[in-house]
Amino acid sequence: MAKAEWNVQAGNSDRQIPATTGAVPLKWASDASTGAPRYIHDPDIVSQAAGAVCPGCGSKLWTVLAGQPQRVRPTAHFRHVAGTPRTACVVVAARLAASHHLASLGYIDLPRRRVTAVSKGFSGEGYEGWVEEPAQRVRISEVRMVDLAAAELTLDDGRTILVDLTGKRVEGEAGRAVITINLSDPALAEMDVDELRARLRLLPPARWCSHWRDRELTTEARTQAVDMARQALDAWSDEDEARFQAQLPPGMDPDATATMRRETLLHRTVKSILEDARRIQAPGLHAAVQRDAPDGYGDGWYDHRVEVLWWSAPAELRFEAVELERRLGRIVPDVVGHLAEPRPRILGGIATRVQRGDDEEEDEQHDEFPAHWSETVLIEVAVTHKVDEEKLRKVRHLDLPTLEIDLGAMGGRLTQDGLRRLVVDGLEGKRWLHHPTLRTQRALLRYKLREHAEVLAYQAYIRAHRRERLLETLPSLWAERYLQALRAFCDANIRIERLRKTEGPRYLEHLDEDSEEWAEVALAAEALEAHGFEGGVERVFARTIVPRILSIQLNTGVGYAVSSAIEVLNAIMNTRSDNSTQWLSLYLIAAKSFDVERHFRPEQVQRFRKWRAEVVGQIEAEAPEYLRPARFDAILSLLFPAMARGIAHGKGRAD
Ligand SMILES: [Zn+2]
């Protein structure tokens, strides 16, 4: 006969009482008067001193071959009056027998109870805490069938456990221990006393549904999870939360507040790390400018390039004080560090690299006058997003060294120690968002590059080779392009002028002759010169004479932050310097050619005419300071055809 297996599952079972293929003989029953389990070969059953009832359906049972254990076909069993027992009756009988023998065994091995809890950090990451009540063997003093599916064990120490014999119970009962053991196999009902005992000893750990200490264990696990989140700098204390809530504007998006919490916490942690360490490893500075040779330069096959670089080594900065989120001008930097005296110097070097085909030549030298670090260094801590364009603009405006530490570069979970290493000693994730020394060094490098003999040779080559191409375009088209480019250059400078008034003059510099805008002007001037119209790049011409004439022509300010011709003429009328009066005849010609008076109010006309009469008087008297050199006459006649007749007339010209 195949031995039936105890089917004890560590897990939830949704097994119904299975249908068996053949009839399982019912070998266990309840004593009709005491309810205690009786085996078919029990002497009292054999002698019929005790009556038997079915523990499943409660009906009276007959015995078949009781006391004859050797008989096999059929084997001894209890028989229902109606005939074959229902499967359910068999299973219930098996449970009754098993729980009875659990009591006679005297102990049960309780499985370990493990409780886990998850705490979600500000970053959204989950932190798991867990506690475990170890497995233990406990003594059983009493077993009582509560119903057809459950037995209650009373332990030596008085605690009770409900054993759910179906192995199906999911929810625990509050404050009560419940374990599940799946005893739903009808084959159990066939086993005799010894077999059952042997099986019970082998009983693998059953599964807990609820445990006496669940509430404490859960609290412990939760505390542990919160601690882990805190150690990963992803959660904070209740007091911190209360303080945070107090200053939170109402109606904020929960995701945004979670990000704010994390940023606040990390900023505070970085600050306290720096306060404690009072030093930081700062990355070196690096600036480079380069110029490639024009196509066809040299032998035309290899790269030619000049590069000028400046760099400084990483440096350790020592702080005297560290402040968190203190307003500075128009921004609130995450951390403001005040450097301890004496402040170190920024030790750098300059290298010039000249590449001529395969040949490379490098010349390196140290800074002769290294600058000192400024008193204040700003530190931006990037948590979820880096400094945006708006803040960067304000940072540039402050013109203080600003270091970004990108905590995203750490990867994985943060720890206090890991963060300290990154912030204090690391270079990874750090970069300079702005540094005044870089700004000045770049200007110096650009100058060095421009003056470099090789670059000057590039320029000469370009001019020589461009001439032919420039001549292919008509001078009138170059004239148009020149005026457009000059207007763009002047307008850009006026915009900068306006910004300087609102933003302060610290970093905004006027466009100069190394700007792209000026390069356009210079190109058109070069083309005009190739066509025989000289003077386009001369400073007085490009910066004063042409902008003034354009202002008169267009009745607006070109190169002046005004909006009408009269305002520009006012400026001209009020200028009294010897080398400016020589060009006045040109403005009079422009005023007449473009009929500027039509834009004036009567009193403006009157004032202008009075001034004009004075100037004309001086010109007719041939006062030398009122007579203009002739060198711009040709180019002006081309640029402003309406003025050509007036210029050709020769009035006011010194010759
Ligand atoms: Zn029955």
Image: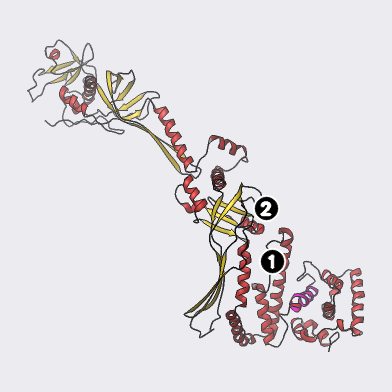
Q: Which residue is mark 2?
A: 330
Which residue is farthest bottom?
655
* Label 2 or label 1, whichever comes before in sequence order: 2
Indicate whether residue 551 is drawn in magenta.
Answer: yes
Report if residue 586 is visible in the image.
Answer: yes
Task: Determine the residue positioned at 44% across, 31% down.
Answer: 219
Position of residue 462 in the picture relative to residue 586 (left or right): left
Position of residue 178 in the picture relative to residue 32 (left or right): right
The image quadrant where one finds ligand 1 is top left
Magenta part of the chain: 541-564
Which kind of residue does numbered mark 1 sit on? Answer: Glu
Tell me how far mark 2 sits from mark 1, CA to CA: 20 Å
Q: Which residue is mark 1?
A: 509
Which kind of residue does numbered mark 2 sit on? Answer: Arg
Circles 2, 1 touching at the beta carbon (< 8 Å): no
Q: Nearer the viewer, residue 86 or 294?
A: 294
Place of residue 19 in the rendered image (x, y in percent of width and height, measured from the top left): 22, 31
Which residue is farthest left?
70
Q: Nearer the viewer, residue 139 or 405?
A: 405
Task: Determine the residue positioned at 88% across, 68% down.
Answer: 601
